[in-house]
Amino acid sequence: MSASCFGAIETSIQNAFSKLGLTIARNRVVDLVSTVVVLAALVVGVLNMSIEDDVFKLWVERDTRIIDEMDFVEDNFDSSRYESFIITPKEGGTLLSRDAWEEVAALQKWIGQVEYKHEDGLIYT
């Protein structure tokens, strides 16, 4: 594109904004009312907005088995009955070794053996 082509584009953009400015200046009330209407519509949208923070709804497909299983767990156990852990390798290690998974199995066994005696005499395992 040549410089004259860019000059023509710039002139047409300047003319369009000039006409827009003149139209707004001549019809201030219409501009003000339309601005308020658009702003009100945006405010209504923000007020009706909902934020989803459930990881399963955000990242897991709806028709997968895990959704049904998680719903079952939530319906049949209180939240203290299941937890998740993120397992990372030791410094310089890898999770792709037999030793790492033996340590994970030992940790799981240890957690399963933990008992807590509440002051009311109940024992939780």
Image: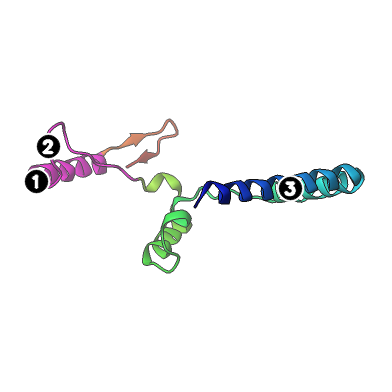
- Dot 2 falls on a residue whose secondary structure is loop
Q: Secondary structure at mark 1?
A: loop
Q: For residue 110, what is the image quadrant?
A: top left
Residue 97 numbered mark, or none: 1
The dot on residue 93 is: 2
Q: Residues within 10 Å of mark 2 (few under 14, many from 20)?
A: few
> Which element is circle 3 on?
helix
Residue type for callout 2: Gly
Q: Residues within 10 Å of mark 3 (few under 14, many from 20)?
A: few
Residue type of the residue flagged with mark 3:
Asn
In the image, 14 versus 40, the foreground residue is 14
The quarter of the rendered structure image containing the C terminus is top left
Residue at 29 percent of width and 42 percent of height: 86
x and y, in percent, of residue 64 in the image: 39, 67
The residue singled out by tag 3 in the image is: 15
Classify residue 1 as left or right of residue 110: right
**Are the residues tagged 2 and 1 within 8 Å (C-beta)?**
yes
Could you tell me how far apart the alpha carbons at marks 2 and 3 are, in whole angstroms?
A: 67 Å
Q: Amino acid at mark 1?
A: Ser
Q: In the figure, residue 108 lies in which quadrant?
A: top left
Residue 67 lies, with reference to residue 48, above or below; the image says below
Q: Return the disc, 3 or 1, that comes first in the chain's sequence.
A: 3
In the image, farthest residue toward the left: 98
